[in-house]
Amino acid sequence: MALTGAAAVWASFQDVQFLALVLAATLTGILVGALPGLSSSMATALLLPFTIYLQPIEAIAVLSALYCAGTFGGSITAILINAPGAPPAAATAFDGYPMAKNGEAGRALGMAAVASSLGGIFSLITLILAAPALAKIAYAFGPPEYFALAVFGLSMLASISGEMAVKNLIGGALGVLISTIGVDLTTGVERFTFGSPHLYEGVHFIPVLIGLFAMTELYEQAGKHKPNYERIRLSAMRLPSRADFRRVWATILRSSGIGTFVGILPAEGGTVAAMIGYNEAKRWSPNKQNFGKGEIEGVAGPEAANNAATGGAMVPTLALGIPGSATAAVILGGLQMHGLRPGPYLFEEQPALLYAIFAAMLLANVAFLALGLVGAKGFSRVSLIPRQFLWPSVFVLCLIGAYGLRHSMADVWIMMVAGVVGVFLRRHGFSPAPIVMGLVLGKLLENSFAQSMIIFDHAAAGFLQRPIALLFFALALCGLFFTPTVRLLRAIFSKSNPGKRS
């Protein structure tokens, strides 16, 4: 009989192997997050092939814990050496590093740990409440609804950044194109195989993920000189005082809500949440003039937001099979690799797995609070690892991860090529996250469209008879044209009211 609810969570906490794996993943996530150049997305992509030897529950729990801890780990080096270990921690450095220079490194790190933990727990509660409710709604979904949902997920790429909207959409289209490589199961037609038998079954997402995240960063780092960071002496960590909590409690609560909401939106992720959390903390603060000079609210805001985005991103990932971030896309790939179907049936068929994920994320948030307060000084030392040792080790892990999945050298070459492509795209302003989104959603998009056409007897007008599908199509149009529409209205308003220009 499947375990449910608190009993399943408690059973997970009593499993010594489960606890050991989650704690090891949490420790690894903090270390990886603290290393400038590495990120939770890269770490989960590297670790994913190795989880094939674990039970599905243990594998997904490890990836989830690594996701939570890696997001927090970036704040350590952001505060101490002004080098964010992960992109979501970039906003933390705005005030965290000035606090450290002012002799308040321990206070800044303590606030980062507490705000991160509270933000993560807030989003986890939202995940527990929202994901099952969303999954119940998804029971009414058929192929047309899933096709419209995939279109909506890809359309959200346009809203990640106003300046990058077109490039993000191009990246998503490239990911969808890669997902079509191989023999089409509906028609039996070979596509983009170039006569190679290694491509008949398509390109597996794991070598591509490792290439886009790890190999791209490795290639980039290979061309850089060793950076010199100004290091701050850290004598001891300390918890924020009661006065600090009274000062930031509203900021943490607001940023937790913002981070959870942004995380739920497909493709947004922690970096966007952190930036919004920082901006809103500054907007509502009575000490706006202190931001950028060492304001503790400037640490609490982005840290609560970027960690809240982790739980938020898991809501559409588990309930609908639409990843909320690049790392959530890797976890979604892990679910598929272990033969699990994300979406409403996951809640019916694998409730124990879901509660194990909840337990792992809760344990990770509590564990990195304790580990961060006790060991931040030690974790900051990982940034001293010589690059001539670090990156060759990463390269070996890339090779093992790509080859170990199917024991195919073709996957290794795919990884290498993906890394080169990733460097080219990065240098021209493209992010890997939209490509990953397109790659993960491509199969759902294609298969659900083919099934819909069969249901509608090849009449696309059949979509007009599906209210839920029409709703997602309307949301997709809003996502695509919202930013340019707002800009157009602002331009018109500025021209008609020249005296009110800022």
Image: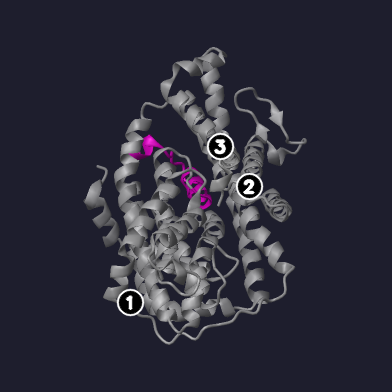
Q: Which residue is mark 2?
A: 164
The kind of residue tagged 2 is: Met
Residue 120 in percent (x, y) is at 37, 58
What SS does tag 2 mark?
Answer: loop
Nearest to the eye among marks 2 and 3: give it: 3
User: Looking at the magenta stretch, what is its main secondary structure?
Assistant: helix
Q: Residue at x 54, y 68 (%)?
A: 85
Mark linked to residue 295: none
Please indicate whether residue 247 sits to the left or right of residue 480 in the image.
Answer: left
What is the distance, in whole Å, between disc 3 and disc 1 at their CAs?
47 Å
Task: Work out whether residue 330 or residue 174 is closer to the camera in this orientation and state it.
Answer: 174
Magenta residues span 325-349
Residue 398 in percent (x, y) is at 63, 60
Q: Which label's residue is closer to the chain start, 1 or 2? A: 2
Can residue 143 be seen at all in this image of the molecule?
Answer: yes
What is the distance, in whole Å, between disc 1 and disc 2 at their CAs?
39 Å
Corner quadrant of residue 238: bottom left
Q: Which residue of the protein is positioned furthest toward the right in this rendering?
A: 194
Mark linked to residue 239: 1
Q: Residue at x 44, y 48 (%)?
A: 262
Q: Which residue is mark 3?
A: 489
Q: Which label's residue is closer to the chain start, 2 or 3? A: 2
In this view, 489 is above or below 414: above
Q: Are marks 1 and 2 in contact (CB under 8 Å)?
A: no
